[in-house]
Amino acid sequence: MLPVDLEAVIGLEVHVQLKTRTKAFCACPVVFGAAPNGAVCPVCLGYPGALPVPNREMAALGARLALATGCDVHARSAFARKSYFYPDLPKGYQITQFDRPLATGGRIDVRGTDGTARAVRLRRVHLEEDAGKSIHDAQGEDVPPGVTLVDLNRAGTPLAEIVTEPDLRTPSEAADFLSRVRRLVRWIGVSDGSMEEGSLRCDANVSLRPAGAEEPGTRVEVKNLNSIAHVRKALEHEVSRQAEALRAGRAVAADSRLFDPASGSTRPMRGKEESEDYRYFPDPDLGPLVLDGAWLEELAASLPEPPEAREARLVAQLGLSPADAATLCATRPLADAFEEAVALHPSNARGVASWFLGGLLARMGDSARQEGRLPVAPAAIARLVARIDDGTVSRRIAAELVDLLCAGAGDVDGLIRERGLFQVTDEGPIRAAVDAVLAANPALAAACRGGKSASFAWFVGQVMKATGGKASPAVVNRLLRERLDA
Amino acid sequence: MTGDLARLLDGPAHGLAAAVSAREVRARDVAGAALLRAGRSRERHGAFLHVAGEDAIEAAAEVDRRVAAGEALPLAGVPIAVKDNVHVAGMPTTAGSRILGAFVPPEDATCVARLKAAGCVVVGKTSCDELGMGSTNETSAFGPVRNPWEPTRVPGGSSGGSAAAVAARAVPLAVGTDTGGSVRLPAAFCGLVGVRPTFGRVSRLGLVAFASSFDQAGPLARHARDAALALEAMSGADPRDATSLPGASPDLLSRLDDGVAGLRVGLLDDEEGVHPDAAAALSATARLLASRGASLVPLRLPRLALGVAAYYLIAAAEASSNLARFDGVRFGARAAGDGPAELVRATRAAGFGDEVKRRVLLGTFALSAGHREAWYERAQRVRTRIALDLGEAFRACDLLLSPTAPGPAFPIGEKSGDPLSLYLTDVFTVPASLAGLPAVAVPAGLSRERLPVGVQLAGPAGSEALLLAVARELEAARGPWTAPPDVIR
């Protein structure tokens, strides 16, 4: 943990792979897991004579992301070339945006250590193309040892890069920031946001300074953060490593470091000792990226209600707890399904919420949650809660019904009718069952009368069993109490 | 070769196209004859790096079929040569460099595809300065090209092979590319009409990029009408080139015979360093235009003198980036190297010639941290300033008349060790390149040593039709043009 006299200053660069059909500057499809070098053309191979043509869908998705984060989206931005040699960088330069980015300003709120929201300012959101992949030490029959293979399927894939101001103060804030970015990009449909597939990637820079100081300390860049957990771990490690150095009176070297998930530590990257000169200049193959004002307004108007606002609304309008609202707003399809169900049974939103949170989410894997693939239609959940509320079925039967519905066994009312799952509220048969159970267990009944309430619950269970689970628990309780208290 | 075919190949492209269209001669016979001439031109002048074979005959036969089917083709059966930094599907592209190895492009450059659609038949690829970098064709990795007017002299560059091939009558038309003057200078040295179009007029798709904000393909021809026909065919918007101008090809033919009456011709007062024969040709041209009804407007544009420095910085900067793709990883030549960095270093060290390396170093320096502001960005400001000055000038005149080159072609080897003096050969051509404006090089007579001397007509954006009409008027006024002594028969 950090000594109280030091403060961490953290900034993130988040690369969001935009969900376009084709690559940033050519017509190749964007695919994951295709045969190596199977989705390439002269443009993304950097052949002589090939020319880039900007993908309008990339600009639209990038602008959508920028608008959703409150950025100022510029009517004119420009593409630049960032030059360096690497085998997986086909042209010897990356097309990116430098001094005239797509958007500037904007913010994303994170939950601070004290639980309140804290604004993280965004310096910029810009568009760029991805590089290919180098596969070092590849294994294979026809691969000589020590050979590096290059797969250029990813080359030219469109990215939006979000650069924050160094406004984050703790590793957990950084992790929270990234999960919010991930939720947002999925929420507004600009990216798959999958860190496993590399469609969301993150570099962090971190420095320490005396608490309250204005001047930042020496900045260290940490790369290769492939999951939100890695971001947190790498930053925790880096913060304590730097704190240790500073406490021991050593300077922190301004280097680029690589996170090693196996050891949970960071180490300096080879060949990154001297800072590279990328020789940025405007790409002469591409004119300015011009976005029409009216088009941008339409784009802004088409944005869905932001996830944070929706959480707040669910709390304020429906009386949900903030935690439940956050869970239901984990993905937009899930929140949509929930609100669809509430709309069909508006008198008991909390009841609907508890069935979503208890009955359904437990049955849904991560991908089902992402895509909002509920095992049961929202309308069925609404009907189910309505049937509980009007006393037709007990919660217990409702749980059975959910099982049946998940197995695809029909609709709520049909199942209740066909399988006779009505709750029995008629006192006659229930009283008979109560009497029979008490008569069969005189000793326990006596103990219970004497004040042993523990066995009361047992008697309830026995009566329920005797009625095939259909008896209304409320009626069973009341009649048992009458008999035992008599 | 029959006399008819020889006569057609010696004559203008539009005459040849008319004969093919009228089915007086078959395109395939024309192609066969042109292939023979191209082969001789390669042997005698080094103009060709690749001469097509049976594929050109087949392409010509296809033109015959299209003509027979009633298609109207403006350049029916015209054999053309294409500078070797412009892609022709199925033919190797070397761009005069070893770095491309055995690279064969998968498709035609847009301008080539359009010429083929207009009826042209590509008979070969012509030599050029390495990757377009040079003014003499001497930087080609495959040897110099000889000027058909005097084989010990350079043909100009970088489109030297295209110019030599057209001047020697191997083909009536050729495609060149012009970055800082690479079509206009060889046109002047070889006594041809050469057009640099407005930037964006001709798609750059399929051109091996030298300096992307300057590169434009343009025709080299012996006749203004042929240049107009070819440029019209090559032009037009291309959705695959983001810098291509919107709109269809401009009409370059209907105003071709409009003459020059009433035109205001701007004349620069600066003739410093101009060869007396070039100066004489310039004033003779001015007098001719005045006698045909044009008015002469003296102009001072002192900042144009900064053009060469600005051009060489910006073009080199862009080149340093454009040439980064030649790393030996995906295509082209590859030298052995231990590890990726060494592979790239060895490949580029072996694959590029000295002039290319010089410009890559210059451009890398001009863009590097700490120098970018002083060099690249300052040069860009000069570029903007020159474009503004020219814009201003074109309010006072309709076109600017200047020499194309400071003098006629010089002997091979004379300046090859002196890059600065070579760069200054471009002094008259780079302003239009910097401003993205069209300019046409037109023959203006012979020097005392019987070498061609040219003049340049530069105009505002989109003024190709007007410039070509002036070129046509000059051509008509002068009468039939003499052939160079060393023509191919």
Image: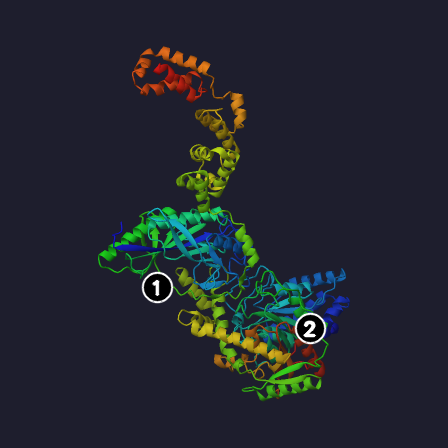
Q: In the image shown, does A457 or A408 lie closer to the viewer?
A: A457
Q: In the image shown, does B240 or A454 lie closer to the viewer?
A: A454
Residue marked by disc 1: A274
Where residue B204 appears, x then y in whole percent?
A: 58, 65
Where residue B86 appears, x then y in whole percent?
A: 58, 66
In the picture shown, does residue B437 fall above or below A153?
below
Please say which color scheme the image uses: rainbow
- Say whether mark 2 and mark 1 are on the same chain: no
Residue at the spot x=67%, y=75% of the render?
A: B466
Residue type at the position of mark 2: Asp
Tell me the chain of label 1. A
> Which mark, residue B226?
2
Check disc 2: other Cα within 10 Å, few if <14, some if 14-19, many if 20+.
Answer: many
Query: Could you tell me if residue B228 is visible in this image?
Result: yes
Residue at the spot x=48%, y=49% of the render?
A: A191
Residue type at the position of mark 1: Glu
Inter-mark Cα distance, 1 to 2: 56 Å
Q: Residue furthest front?
A: A486
